[in-house]
Image (cartoon, grey):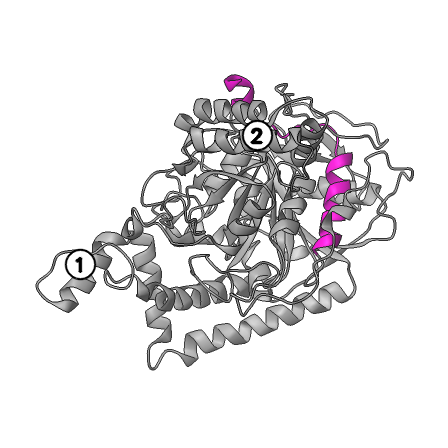
């Protein structure tokens, strides 16, 4: 098997961060241990590259590899509910057999050949339903693939299914899906995060190799943190949005999940590039992201020597769990050990991002979702006159969270309130962008937690929307500024059967994803004492 079935109990790490006192990375064990300061190679490896090596060396056939994933998916899906729709096993295995035949004929294969890819259900797919997690689109089958999906298929990727999400991407827990609630593989009583919770859970549980999600205010990065996987939000415009169901068009981006930084980077490289079908996609040349994945046998004990890293002070203020603070401080110290020059930076406008984001996102969603009226798009209710048809179709098709955000957005855009809310939020957005530019002028990357807490219980915040919204404070500013960000697991806090993972967020200037991938790759390859494989995996295979 490509994926180790061995699971090690998470261990504590003792690090130092501008202090002579050791700071503990919180763990489910009570006694901390001190790690050897000598850098060592971690067990994290690229599953995509391993699959390619196995296929080309004839160690395993694509059919054997795909069967192993399908077996695991069948065993774990009843507990997790990661998927809304699954490709038939016969279809997936037929693609695997065709790949085997191609290899036997010594024909070239694509970089994603034999790689099972899950796709968030707000990305259009021509060969299976695309519902956006909403009852109003129940049964809808688009006549085309989203550009990101099309590019994955062209490079040999096999789409295994469509993953669950908060309805139209509106939520942080995947509980506001119109169909089902997804569970976290680390503890099935907890949420996987959202809105791309299904995509994150599927990668974490190794139901697929990589997955596509979307990120409007943290919907890739927060679930990556909760599920202990790598989540990559690219620069706005790096990846085409054609075929992505619009929530907030100026904020939406297609993002990537993987069990390693290399896998997320390879997937990003596959889907990036200009698209004539999306006027907002950048014509900037796409660099070879895979060149950043250097060997883990670093000749220098400080492979990141001189890299300037700024820890955002406001992200460790009140409201952040103490265990999360300890893990992030430990991760910062690990970056120092790798040679980084660490400093604290202040973004005074950071707290303004959350209210500005919700005004802007809700305003754009009220416009974007007007198309779902039962006539142009969406399932239609029976009514005697037109206005009743509109209202009944939307009332029965939309969930409560979507209705609330449409009302918020419509109010913010209404006459007499536009200047007070929407215009002011746009002005705050400019201030936030300027503050990021200033901070990144003196730092190569910025770091912060990906979320104020680890995964919480299903239902814990469902009826407290303000508490749920507050959980996005670490991520929304990045979307408002249109910057790239990478989240990778860096430690654990107590909870669940084996601890709960915590993610470190790295932020860079626009179109500098390759810098994030290089730093993230070296970080994960040298992080000791943590194996980010949920216990559910060892129980199922």
Residue 44 rendering spot, x and y as whole percentages: 70, 32
Residue 296 rendering spot, x and y as whole percentages: 81, 35
Badge 1, how many Cα within 10 Å: few under 14, some, many 20+? Answer: some
Front-lying residue, 233 or 266: 266
In the image, taking residue 117 as reference, residue 489 lies left or right, namely right
Residue 527 rendering spot, x and y as whole percentages: 75, 34
From where the camera sits, is residue 7 visible?
A: yes
Residue 129 rendering spot, x and y as whole percentages: 36, 45
- Residue sitting at x 65%, y 40%: 263
Badge 2, how many Cα within 10 Å: few under 14, some, many 20+? Answer: some
Direction right: furthest residue: 299
Direction front: furthest residue: 105
Where residue 428 is drawn, which disc sits there? none
In this picture, is 28 found above or below 488?
Answer: above
In this picture, is 41 found above or below 352?
Answer: above
Write down the region rendered in magenta.
513-541
Q: Is residue 5 magenta?
A: no
Front-lying residue, 252 or 359: 252
Q: Which residue is mark 2?
A: 494
Dominant SS in magenta: helix
- Cα distance between the residues tagged 1 and 2: 46 Å
Labels 1, 2: front one: 1
Q: Which residue is mark 1?
A: 392
Direction left: furthest residue: 384
The local secondary structure at tag 1 comes to helix
Image quadrant holding the N terminus, namely top right
From where the camera sits, is residue 454 visible?
A: no
In the image, taking residue 518 as reference, residue 166 lies left or right, namely left
Front-lying residue, 225 or 295: 295
In the image, taking residue 415 as reference, residue 90 lies left or right, namely right
């Amino acid at each position: 098997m490509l994926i180790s079935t061995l699971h090690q109990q998470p261990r504590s790490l003792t690090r130092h961060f501008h202090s002579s006192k050791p700071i503990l990375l919180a763990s489910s064990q009570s006694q901390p241990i001190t790690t050897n300061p000598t850098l060592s190679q971690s067990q994290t490896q690229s599953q995509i590259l391993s699959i390619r090596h196995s296929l080309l060396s004839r160690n395993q056939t694509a059919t054997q590899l795909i069967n192993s994933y399908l077996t695991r998916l069948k065993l774990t899906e009843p507990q997790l509910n990661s998927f809304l729709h699954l490709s038939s096993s016969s279809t997936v295995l037929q693609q695997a057999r065709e790949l085997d035949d191609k290899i036997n004929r010594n024909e070239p294969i694509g970089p994603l050949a034999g790689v099972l890819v899950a796709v968030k259900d707000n990305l259009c797919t021509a060969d299976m339903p695309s519902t956006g997690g909403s009852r109003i689109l129940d049964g809808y089958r688009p006549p085309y693939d989203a550009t990101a999906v099309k590019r994955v298929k062209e490079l040999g990727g096999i789409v295994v299914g469509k993953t669950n999400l908060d309805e139209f991407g509106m939520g942080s827990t995947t509980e506001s899906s119109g169909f089902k609630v997804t569970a976290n593989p680390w503890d099935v009583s907890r949420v996987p995060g959202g809105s791309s919770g299904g995509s994150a859970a599927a990668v974490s549980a190794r139901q697929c190799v990589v997955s596509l999600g979307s990120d409007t205010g943290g919907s890739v990065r927060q679930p990556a943190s909760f599920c202990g996987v790598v989540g990559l939000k690219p620069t706005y415009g790096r990846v085409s949005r054609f075929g992505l169901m619009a929530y907030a068009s100026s904020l939406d981006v297609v993002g990537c999940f993987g069990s390693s930084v290399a896998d997320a980077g390879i997937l990003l490289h596959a889907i990036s590039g200009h698209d004539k079908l999306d006027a907002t996609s950048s014509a900037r040349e796409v660099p070879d992201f895979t060149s950043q994945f250097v060997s883990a046998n670093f000749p220098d004990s400080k492979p990141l020597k001189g890299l300037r890293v700024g820890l955002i002070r406001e992200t460790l203020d009140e409201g952040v769990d103490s265990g999360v603070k300890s893990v992030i401080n430990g991760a910062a110290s690990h970056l120092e050990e790798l040679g980084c020059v660490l400093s604290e930076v202040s973004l005074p406008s950071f707290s303004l991002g959350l209210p500005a984001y919700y005004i802007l996102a809700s305003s754009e969603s009220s416009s974007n979702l007007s198309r779902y009226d039962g006539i142009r798009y969406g399932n239609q209710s029976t009514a005697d006159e037109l206005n009743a048809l509109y209202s009944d179709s939307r009332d029965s098709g939309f969930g409560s969270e979507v209705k609330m955000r449409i009302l918020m957005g419509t109010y913010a855009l209404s006459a007499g309130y536009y200047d007070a809310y929407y215009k002011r939020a746009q002005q705050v957005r400019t201030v936030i962008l300027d503050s990021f530019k200033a901070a990144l002028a003196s730092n190569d990357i910025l770091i912060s937690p990906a979320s104020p807490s680890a995964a919480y219980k299903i239902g814990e915040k469902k009826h407290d929307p303000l508490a749920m919204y507050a959980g996005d404070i670490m991520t929304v500013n990045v979307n408002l500024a249109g910057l790239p960000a990478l989240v990778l697991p860096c430690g654990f806090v107590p909870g669940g059967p084996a601890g709960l993972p915590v993610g470190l967020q790295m932020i860079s200037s626009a179109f500098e994803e390759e810098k994030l991938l290089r730093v993230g790759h070296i970080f994960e390859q040298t992080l000791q004492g943590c194996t980010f494989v949920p216990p559910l995996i060892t129980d199922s295979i």
